Every structure is written in structure tokens, then in C-alpha cells.
Amino acid sequence: MLDAARALRANELTAVDLWAQCKRRADVDALVSRAFVGDRASVDAHARRGLADARASDARREGGASSEGSGGTASAVDGVPFAAKDNLCASVGTTTAGSAVLRGYRSPVEASAIARLRERGGVLLGKTNMDEFGMGSHTRGVESLGGTTTNPISWKGARSSGGSSGGSAACVANGSAFYALGSDTGGSVRLPAAYCGTVGLKPTYGRVSRFGLVAYCSSLDTVGVLARTVRDAGVVLAAMQGEDALDSTTVPRCEALDALAAAFEREAFDADAPFDADTDADAPLRGVRVGVPEEYAVAELTQEVYDAWDATARLMESLGAEITRVSTPRARDALACYYVLAPAEASSNLARYDGIRYGDLTPVMSREEFLNAGDFQSAVAKARTLGFGLETRRRVAVGAFALSSERAAEYFEKAQIVRRLISNDFDRVFRGPDAVDVLLTPTSASTAPRLEDVEALSPAQTYAADVMTTPASLAGAPAMSIPVGRSRVTGLPIGAQLIAPRFREASLVRIGAHVERRASYSTAAASVSALDARGEAATARRDELVALISSEGVAVDDVIAANKELSRLEPVVEAYARVASLRAERASLETLIRDGDEDIADLAREELREIEARIPDAELTLQTLFLPRDDADDRGAILEVRAGAGGDEAALFASDLFRMYSLHARKRGWRFDVLNVSETEGRGVREASAEVLGDGAFGRLKFESGVHRVQRVPETETQGRVHTSTASVAVLPHAEEVDMDVRDEDVRVDTMRASGAGGQHVNTTNSAVRLTHVPTGIQVVIQDERSQHKNKAKAFSVLKSRLYDRERSKLAKERAELRSSLIGTGDRSERIRTYNFAQGRVKDHRLDGAASTTADVKALMDGFALDEFTEALMKKRTEELLSLSTMDSK
Ligand code: GLN
């Protein structure tokens, strides 16, 4: 954020530029990690207001004015885009806190935290995804509201972005916001920060106003910051902090934090004014005492997290800090204590949601249903059952139990006592002659887990993710997660947590800023957007493969596999190299501007503008290569062609199409094995299918699915009239053995005589095979081979493909909004192409302009010109996936 503020100051970029850049990345992110939430209207409302705010910021700068910042300097947040978790009320768009009960809810107020940033010129981009009401550690949202936000740093396989502020962490990590607000009740800012490789700062309880924050556990809730650097987080916290008449638990400003933030700003604007100029450059942490609490070395800690923790302690020591072992014995009880207190307060806070006030429940429960529910109590109970997700209902039940008059003494009151003891633990280590300034612990026991592994956990196992973060929450102490390393195996970030005494954010942030400056991940944290991490990973992998291929005694199969992977990696490596070289150019121009004389600086400024303008496009190209690939694209395909409306002529056309695909396959070097042809009396076919095997066959042929229409004078037509007939094509991904398990008892096998019109397919034995998959009713008939045995094997292969396709369509439906942008999937009844032989041209109805028509019908029917359509369709699909904002950015 400070980098962006510096660029604004130097007139290198405008606030509108920054906003547009974030917006483009957010649009791509909508298809990748899905950090942002809100329906179209809400997203647009934020876009309109954000853009207006950015313009106003530019106008202020142009007029020489600047909004008042912390410590009297120009506010660094002015003009810089940020995002906010969806449990912070905004006065435009919706605020749902991730709950169906709040669907469509429009807040009449703006949360104080957001309002203060906007007052200082901050530009709100939109709202981010979260676990319902903040209850969770993985940002697995309600599917219809935001779904799950996946970790943007994980390259292979879907991993948790952490929770509950996972959307805020993801948008910071992938560069679609310069910083984001989150809420932290038991770790919800720190955990996602650790998983996504950002900084996550949770302030002292009372430091930032909770006004406008949807309440979860009021005595623990705090508003925190997710940022790319500790400095950014400190500056944002300074801009938000302070008393608020609307929240009686707030405390006066911390002046030391304001002063530190001002020093960070001065440093950003003037390279000669380091924030720590008054400390010993070699030992900036001299005099700082760091406590390492042994209770955090739990059995679940992975080796790599332990190593990173240890390395951070040694790093701090090398900076002059004194490291001591300390003990906070009650930390072990924090988790149990938290999971009594948080649900208890939640059950009371959530009592206000009754299906009448706040959001719109009608999508799940109609007005009539509500009114007809009998008495009022059961209507509300039903609304709450439908409006709350499973975890929320579980917590309300647990909380009500813990608070019930019979059980309160045993649970709620006991937990209050334990909370006091935990707080005393912290007081003890932070006071007295042996007092430490900060505690250093891991933020989480492991790096981001796979989402599929998370799904398999019990609720209690899920709660264990918060074991490192809940103690500071219960003590009300400020704590911060800083990225300090990466897993050598997965490349995923590892976070370390610093905890300071209550109200000592200034010391916490100052120490953190020194650590980040030296930690291996720290510089990366500023620039390691997800894109870079992936680009780097791809480059490293390329080098590895190149080395493998040229190594001695390498097996032929390995070379083939490596080449295959390389051909997929090369475009990524190239695109990344281009981004990197533009950035390097930018950096050297910036140096020229700073150090060169005026004339040179002027020239450099001009050139810089040009380079800056090219960077987003280069990044976008790279981003495109990371778009979710259909994992079936590389497979072979099952092709099915059927005659449609138009009698014999349709059968002739079906036969022509089938021939076209077989010739096309030959041209591309694919194998084309006919599975089944049922012929008509003439030259036509009623139905024909084939297995097309070869690299990427499905990825290219899938665009052929749909209805093909022909307009020509049939051979049988004596009057010379043009007829219109159709044939339909279905292309299924080929299912290999691994994909679908078809149980024998589910399949009925019938054998019969092959049918046909007297051609070579007629025989007198029962060689034709019909399979019926009983659970789904799918039938497959294969009669092409002479042996029943072979036909049966082929039939099974087709059946598996059909089942696999069914499974995929089901999945596709779940990802409906994503899929709606894909061409020709799902709806096979749509008319996709017209072959007008009469006029000698073929038009593809999904394409526009010149690309949509070919005049070379013969080349097409002979399988040669199909690639032109395929490529145009592939390009169009990519563009649709990127579906860049329709909003004009100027
Ligand atoms: N995972 C914790 C919970 O589910 C953290 C919540 C939070 O900090 N909002 O309660």
C-alpha cells in the first residue's frame, strides 16, 4: 500500500489507475480463488462508488490538497484501493456476513472502520468472502453467496485460504486489493494471513471501533488488517484506531502508533528517511526481549513450521534481541475455553435473526410458508433452521446449552474463570523483572491444508486449527502473523505470530517491521502476488525438467512425459519472463527518476508511463494461462453423431459429419476407432459413434457438441429444392479405467443380432451387445465388431464415458455461474453451426465477424478447415472466462 501511495505522490499513477488494476485482477480472481462476494447489483454499486472515490482522490491531488493523515503527514491511504470482509457494514451494496439469513441485506450505516478509511481517502473495492458469521477456519461460504475461497498461492489442488477472513487474505495475496479489513475473534485474521502469505494484524480489543461489525462474540470481536507488509498494516491500523462514540469499548488513540505510521510514510516517500534511523542498523532489536512459550510446541506442529519458528527466533537474536523461554501454562486450555465462550455469546447475538427483520429469506422460505407455519415460534424456528448453516446452528445449540441455567455454572462460568487465568498468564510474562516485550509463536500448526482433507474433519478437529491464536484473543492482546518462510515441499507460506501486551501495537508493529525486513519471505510478501509465486514455480519446474532430459541414463518414457509437461509450461515461463522484464525496466526507470538530472528524469517519466501501461496486459496474459483448465481437455473423446430432423437427408448429413471428424482426426494424428454405425437404407447413418484417442482430443472436439444444420439440395430431390435438415453431435470426455467404477451388478447385458441395411455389419450370430446401466437407465448398443466379446468391451468403455460425463455435468451445474460463460457445454440442443451448401458457406453461430464463416465447405468437410473454428472458439472461451469488467475504467 505504501508503494502505491508513493506512486500516487510521484504522479506516476492515478488513483483511478490503481482502482482499475485491482478491478481487473478481481475479475480474474472471480474465476480462480473467488475472494469477493456480492450479487451483480452489489458489485456494481461498489464499483460506482469506488471509482467516484478514486476520481475524487485524484482531483484532490491535482488541486494540491490532501486529506489529513496520521501524525499530520499526507494520508497514505488516500487513493489506495482496499477490500472489506462481508461482516463489516457498507452503506452501499449488501452485507451478509456469509449467511443466507442476511441475503440481500442492505445496511443503513457504514462500519466505523470503513468510514474512517474512506474519510482519509481510502477507496473501497468491495466485500470479501467469509465463513458464516465468522464461524470457521477455511472460508467455506454458503454456496449461493460466495462458495469457498481457495488459496491463491496453492498451485496444485484446492487448498484452504484459512478463515474466517479467507476472502480478505486471498485478495491481498493475489494482488486484487492493496490491503483488506477482516475480523478476528479467535484467529480469523491471523490464520488466513499465515495460509496465504500475507501479514495479519489483530489489534487490542477496543483499539478499533466495532460499530457496524456484525456481532459474533462481542467480548472477543476485533477488526483487523490483512496487508502485504507489516508497515502497511501499521499505517492502516493507525488510520482506523481511536475512540468512537458509537462503540463504548473503544480506547483513545495510541500516539506511539501514529508516530510510527508517520515514520513509515516518510520512509516510503523519501528513501533517505528510514523509519528506524535512530536504531543501530546492525542490531535494531537490541534491548528487545522475546519470549518463546514452550506450550506452543504442540505435537501437531509440522516439522517445517517448527523449523520456521526456530529460524525466526534465531533471526531476531541476530538482530540483537534477547530470546528467553517462557511458560504460559494455561494456553493449553484456551481452545476449550474459547469454544464455550464464543458459541455462548453467538447464541445470544444471533437471536436477532428471526427471518422477519434484516435479510431476505424468501429464496429458501416463501412468505406463505412463513405465515402458514402455525404459531409464531415455529415460524421463526423454521426460518432459523433454513437461514442458518449447519455450523451456525451447531454453535447456537452449544451456546444455548452452555448458558442454560442448569449448565451455566459448569460451562459458561467456568470458562470465564479460565479466560481470566489465561489473561493472567500473559500479564505474568509481560510484567515484572523478567518481562518480555513480545511472544513469538507459530500462527498455525501446519501450512494451508487441502480442502478435501478439511472436509473429512470432525467439528472438533476443525476447531483445533485455532490452537495457536485463541490465547491472545482471550487475553485481548494484540497479535500479528508475519510470513517468515515457505514449505520446501509445497511452496506454501508459513507464518509466525508475535503477541504483545495489551495496547502495545506500536511496539508489536515496530518489531514486526524489523523481522519482515530480514525474513526470507518478507520482501517477497510485498511482491509475491499469487501470480509471481506461480510464475516462479513454473520456471523452477521448467529448469528441473530441462535438466532431467539432458541427464545421463534417463529413461525414454520419462523424456516423453517431461516433454509433454514442458510444452504446457513453456508459455507460462515465457509470459512470466515478460512480466518480470517489464518490471525490471520499471525499476531502473524509477531509479533514473530518483537519481538522474531533471531532463533525464522527464524522459524516464514518459517512458515509465508507457511501461506501466503495458504491465497489466502482460500480467493478464500470464493470468490467462492459469485459468482453471478443464481437466478433461487432455483426454481422448467419445464422439456420437445422430441424424436429426429431415429423414434420409439428415442421415446423409450425419454420415458426412462423421466422415469429416474421421478425416480431421487423421489430420491431427489422433486414432479414430469406430464403435458403432447404424446405417439407413441409403448411404446415410442413423447413429454413429467413435473413440477418438490422442492428445487434447476432447479439449478441441468438445466445441462440436450441439445441433448442426444443413441447407442443400438432397441427392434424392428431383425438383432442385433446398432442404433443411439437422444432425446432433455429442462429444464426451473419454473415461479411463481410473475414473468410473461401474459395478457389474448395476449393468444388464443383452446380446442380439446386429442390425443393418444389408451391408457388412450384418451377421447371423448374436454379436451385438446392449448394456443397460440400471441406476441411471443409460443404454449403450455396440455392434461394430464381429465378436461379441469385443463389442462388450467397447460398450463398457462408452458406458463409462457417459457416466463420467453425467458426473461432470452434475459438477458443472454446481459451478453454474462459471459454466454459463463456457461455450456449448451443458445444452446440447442449441444450434451451433449451419452448413449452407447452396450458398457455399458454413457459419458458426457462436462466433462473430469474419471468424464465424468459412467459404471453403469442401476443405471443412474433408476435415481440413475445422481447426479455424476450433481455435476461434477456444479464444472466445478464454475471453469469456476472463470476462473483463463491463465498467469503463476511465
Ligand atoms: N475459527 C474460529 C471460530 O470458528 C475463529 C473465528 C474468528 O476469529 N472469527 O470461531
Image (cartoon, helix red, strand yellow):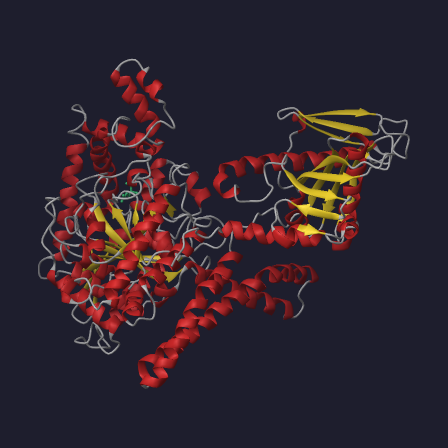
The quarter of the picture where the N terminus appears is bottom left
Lateral position of residue 203 relative to residue 39, left or right: left
Task: Residue 863 in the image: state x and y as whole percent.
Answer: 77, 50
The answer to whether 786 is drawn above or below residue 125 in the figure is above
Residue at image coords 18%, 75%: 279
Task: Residue 316 in the image: state x and y as whole percent.
Answer: 26, 67
Lateral position of residue 618 relative to residue 60, left or right: right
Task: Residue 321 in the image: state x and y as whole percent.
Answer: 21, 69
Residue 65 visible to an observer of this rendering? yes
The answer to whether 688 is drawn above or below residue 225 in the figure is above
Quadrant hosting residue 346: top left
Number of numbered markers: 0
Residue 314 visible to an observer of this rendering? no
Q: Nearer the viewer, residue 38 or 754?
A: 38
Quadrant hosting residue 352: top left
Lateral position of residue 265 relative to residue 146, left or right: left
Figure quadrant, ligand 1: top left
The quarter of the picture where the C terminus appears is bottom left
The answer to whether 389 is drawn above or below residue 188 in the figure is above
Task: Residue 108 in the image: state x and y as whole percent.
Answer: 22, 39
Lateral position of residue 822 relative to residue 36, left or right: right
The answer to whether 228 is drawn above or below residue 365 in the figure is below
Quadrant hosting residue 612: bottom left
Q: Nearer the viewer, residue 322 or 557?
A: 557
Q: Nearer the viewer, residue 60 or 339?
A: 60
Residue at image coords 62%, 40%: 739
